[in-house]
Image (cartoon, rainbow, N blue to C red):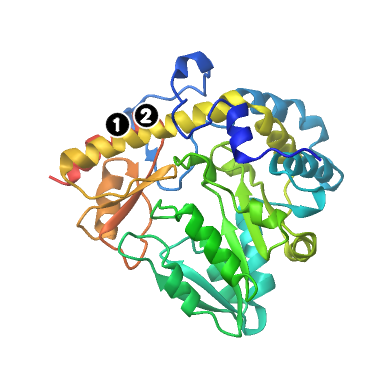
Amino acid sequence: MKTIDRRNWLRTVGLSGGFAMLGGLDALAIEPATTPDLKNKIARLSSNENPYGPSKRVRQVITNNFDIACRYPFSMLSELAQQIADKEGVAKDHIVISGGSGEGLCAAGLAYGMSGGEIIAADPTFQQILRYAENFGAYVHRVPVDKDMDHDLDAMANRITSKTRLIYICNPNNPTGTIIEKNRLHQFITSVDDKAVVFSDEAYYDFITEPDYPSMVDLVKQGRNVIVSKTFSKVFGLAGMRIGYLIARPDIASRMKKAVMANTNILALQAAKEALQDTEFYKFSIAKSAEAKSLIYNTLDQLGLEYIKSHTNFVFFKSGRHINGLIDDMKKEKVHIGRPFPPFYDWARISTGKIEEVAQFAKALKKVMG
């Protein structure tokens, strides 16, 4: 069993030390799909997708595997699971592959929320696991974020009861883009995981700018009551193919496998296998997202709008306007921005699209904000 921790993984792809080594995009020789004329194009900056993917290598693999797309995927899950296990430094029985990490979230919501189980989460945060759990009878404690829009871990700990079965932490958080201080997160999890399972959603982990920020997979390796979810939707650009995975102790992983209802497909499996090896596209995606964030920050600075420095591929900013009206006005300018995130109705989330799309956003926002 190989062990590839974050530092070694980033070193492998030339990204050790955070963003410090991201220069030289031209050297990557990446040529994503041609972008049409933006005159009548909608800039879709609402769903935190990677508009540059799948990479050329992945597209070729997808094409090459059409002949086996008629087959069920079950026999091919094992190979990808082993590849993921090698990357994460765990045994294969720790890996659960699902139809996007969202399906893994739903599986956890089902397994731990049924029959009145209680779940604790920040507010606002990603809602899929919470709403799914509520559909099956769970009670969700939504704990407001603190003044810095970060998880209020002390308040979350105070909500734990004898009925608490799961504590959900989206880190980096969606929609705020914040991360929990690494030592604080580790301390929190190890102080509460004897009372409830902790679910660490790391969908945006690859975009973290802090050097040597640990994945909570480290705690899985220690046998703790922790589930970590990761996805191929963001940095790898496979959102439309629906493939993600969970990492957990084997007994927890087995329970999650029983709760997963939406398996992935042959083409997604082959695409994911190739994506893990395409280090050039990995570097390209992170660097282009950083470039787009810089342009977004510059626009918001020009307008004097408050925003949160983001560890993701989106930016959360305070427009001072109700989000519903801002969404409508931006749509008139052919720019789609993120949905409402109550209670922050005067804040908006904007994804890092292609550079020309971000320029379209900047122009539209300046017009809409007067």
Cα–Cα gap, marks 1 and 2: 6 Å
The quadrant of the picture occupied by the N terminus is: top right
The quadrant of the picture occupied by the C terminus is: top left
- For this view, does 195 lie left or right of residue 178? right
- Report the front residue among 8 and 265: 8
**Badges 1 and 2: C-beta atoms under 8 Å apart?**
yes
- Report the front residue among 172 and 56: 172
Q: In the rendering, at what x and y percent does residue 132 appear?
A: 58, 69
Q: Secondary structure at mark 2?
A: helix
Q: Quadrant of residue 216?
A: bottom right
Q: In the rendering, at what x and y percent does residue 153 appear?
A: 45, 68
User: Would you call the spot at circle 1 few (<14 residues within 10 Å), some (14-19), or many (20 or more)?
Assistant: some
User: Would you call the spot at circle 2 few (<14 residues within 10 Å), some (14-19), or many (20 or more)?
Assistant: some
- Report the front residue among 239 and 121: 121
Kind of residue at disc 2: Ile
Q: Secondary structure at mark 1?
A: helix
Q: Which residue in the structure is indicated by mark 1?
A: 359
Residue 132 visible, this angle: no
The residue sitting at 40% across, 38% down in the picture is 352
Q: Is residue 27 depicted above or below 57 in this figure? A: above
Q: Is residue 169 depicted above or below 297 in this figure? A: below
Kind of residue at disc 1: Ala
Q: Is residue 169 depicted above or below 301 in this figure? A: below
Q: Which residue in the structure is indicated by mark 2?
A: 355
Residue 311 visible, this angle: yes
- For this view, does 201 lie left or right of residue 5? left
The residue sitting at 43% across, 21% down in the picture is 23
